[in-house]
Structure formats: structure tokens, C-alpha cells
Image: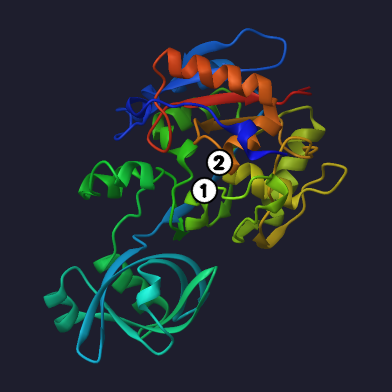
Amino acid sequence: MRVDLFDFDLPAERIALRPASPRDSARLMVVGPGQAVADRIVRDLPDILRPGDALVFNDTRVIPAQLEGIRERAGQVASISATLHRRLAPDRWLAFVRGAKKLQPGDVVHFGETPEACLLSALDGKVLSKDDDGVVFAFDLAGAHLDEAIARIGHIPLPPYIASKRPEDAQDRADYQTVYARDEGSVAAPTAGLHFTPDLLDRLKAHGVGLHFLTLHVGAGTFLPVKSDDTADHRMHPEYGLVTAETAAALNAVRARGGRIVAVGTTSLRLLESAAAEDGMIHPFAAETSIFITPGYRFRAVDVLMTNFHLPRSTLFMLVSAFAGLDTMKAAYARAIASGYRFYSYGDGSLLFREDAR
């Protein structure tokens, strides 16, 4: 499909720079086939979902994967900004690098907050290779020791549409993390989950809605624009996902009883669809996925999707258009813009029912 079919005009003032407070006070647009669009609040979810439905959350934890460093070579110094996006080994990461042209295999980058700090207490990364997927760094620490160093000197990699308007600060370390985050490894938050509070989770359970967890470590590739003119020419970056046998069995039981699978976020949806067979049965999954969902895709596992409002021409807007219908989503987004909904990672949410929802 032509990428320009997924374009729309978005005023800059609709981009949220801070989340709603409290988290579950964000607006929620409910969109379903054959029904009027409804404006609700996230905390209304227990009144919208049915007892027996199952919410599926991505419990990945965001790491401070933005590293600033200095490369020195033959007396020449260059500033390097790297965003880690895929762990390759206990001591190795693949990274997107701003300033990659300044690097060549064999270079050592001293990562730290300032040039002085780099010289005194640097985390050193040696460039092993670079290509279109990024730069491979071998660090001088490994495993938990490397994780600790990254946590100490790294920054939360805010999405470009926020980072271009303000710097990351201490509040983002809390705001850009779900309340149920557990398994470290993401460089971007599963942002639909940012709307949930412990109280809302308790109320959902009391209403009879099941809460289930899987893990997809979100890579920095989620921020990359679609540069091709046709969706067939775009390549997704692989991300590691885990669906346990216990979770798969529980979700299959929910569907067998007539309950609906409600994915919280596009990351949960992409992993569930990767783990599902043609007949809709969800199987245990522990592998990388690079699934790219566009209109025409036949959904196997997910009945309802809760997600934020996404960038024009993005793979995420293509996904929601596949789920609820392109014309439906264009109309919903136009309505959201006109009525003041807040967009992107810190913005408001939507609850989408599949075009062929049961």
C-alpha cells in the first residue's frame, strides 16, 4: 500500500510533553464498528469491558539507553550520541548512533555525562562493526555490571517528538515507566500501559477482568520513520518477545469461554499475533519478531486494542488502521485533533474494537 495513504496533518500543540496526572485521568476514545464514537476516561475501563475479558500487558522495563560519549582518535575528539536498541551478548549492544560517520571499527568511545566524567569514570565501548542496522559496541563491562553502568550514566531515550521540545529530566524516569514494569530491556515504553494505576488494576480485577503479562523488549526502531513510498518496501527491526506457556494457556481458556483478548498497546498485540497460529490458538513464544501489520492482515488472537494516538505515516498508525479500518481511523484521528486529544507517548488513549469484532 502507498505510505501516503496514512498521512494526516497534526498541529504541534496536540503533542503531549507530560502525561496526565493521575495517570488514569487521561481521555479515552472508544471506537467500534457500527457504534458511535464515545469520549470516556481511562479510569472508566471497568465499566466498558466485560467480566471474563482478559487484558494483556507488556511488562518490559525501560532502561536509560541513551548514552553520550567522546571518541578520541589521533588527537581528534568527536561527540557521539548512541541509543542502545538490541542486546547481542552480555557485553555487546547494537545501537543507533547520531554521528556514526565519525566512527570506524576499532574506535573506542568513552561514554559518560561530560568529557571530564568520561576520562575519569568512563564506560568504554569499542566499535566492532557498523551497517544500516546500526553500530555494534563491545563494552569493557558485561552482564549485571554493564547494566549498572548504563543505569548510572544513561538517559531515558524520550521519543524524538518530545526530546526535540524539551530535555529529559528526573521526572521522566518515573513517568516513562509502567507501574507493573518488571523485565529490563526496552528503550521505549509500551505507552498505552502508562495510563494504568494500582487502583485501576484492582478495580478491573474486582470487575472480573483478567490481567495477564507478556514481555516484548521495544527497540529504538519504533521511532524510525517509514522512508519508503510503499509499505511492501519497509523493514521492521526485530525485537525479542516472550509468551510463557502459562500465559498462552490462560488466554486460550479465556477465548474458549467467550471472553475477549484486549491487548494493552501495539507491542502486546504484535507479540500475541506473532505467537498465534492460523486457528487463533496462542502458543508459547520466546524469539524475535519483526511482524509488520498493515491493512489486509487477518488478526488471529486480539479482539480489542487499547493504544495511544500515533504519528502520521508511522507503522503504528498502519497497524491501528489494519485493526479498526483505515477510513474509521482517519475519521477518529480527525475527531481527536478537533476535540483536543493529546497525542503520542504521553498523550491520551483509544480503545479500538476490531472491524470484525465478535
- Pinpoint residue 254: horizontal percent, then vertical percent: 74, 35
Residue 225 image label: 1
Instruction: Specify few, some or many for label 2: CA neighbours under 10 Å numbering under 14, 14-19, or 20 or more.
Output: some
- Residue under label 2: 314
Between residue 357 and residue 282, name the one nearer to us.
Answer: 357
Q: State the count of labels.
A: 2
Type of the residue with mark 1: Pro
Relative placement, left or right, of 211 versus 231 is: left
Type of the residue with mark 2: Ser
Relative placement, left or right, of 144 versus 334 is: left
Question: Considering only order in the chain, which callout, 2 or 1, is on the residue closer to the N terminus?
Answer: 1
Q: Residue furthest front?
A: 229
Q: Residue furthest top?
A: 36
- Pinpoint residue 183: horizontal percent, then vertical percent: 48, 58
Between residue 326 and residue 86, name the one nearer to us.
Answer: 326
Q: CA distance from mark 1 to mark 2?
A: 6 Å
Q: Residue furthest left?
A: 116
- Pinpoint residue 347: horizontal percent, then vertical percent: 40, 30
- Pinpoint residue 226: horizontal percent, then vertical percent: 57, 48
Q: Residue at point 43% right, 57% down?
A: 187
Q: Quadrant of the C terminus?
A: top right
Does residue 347 appear in this view?
yes
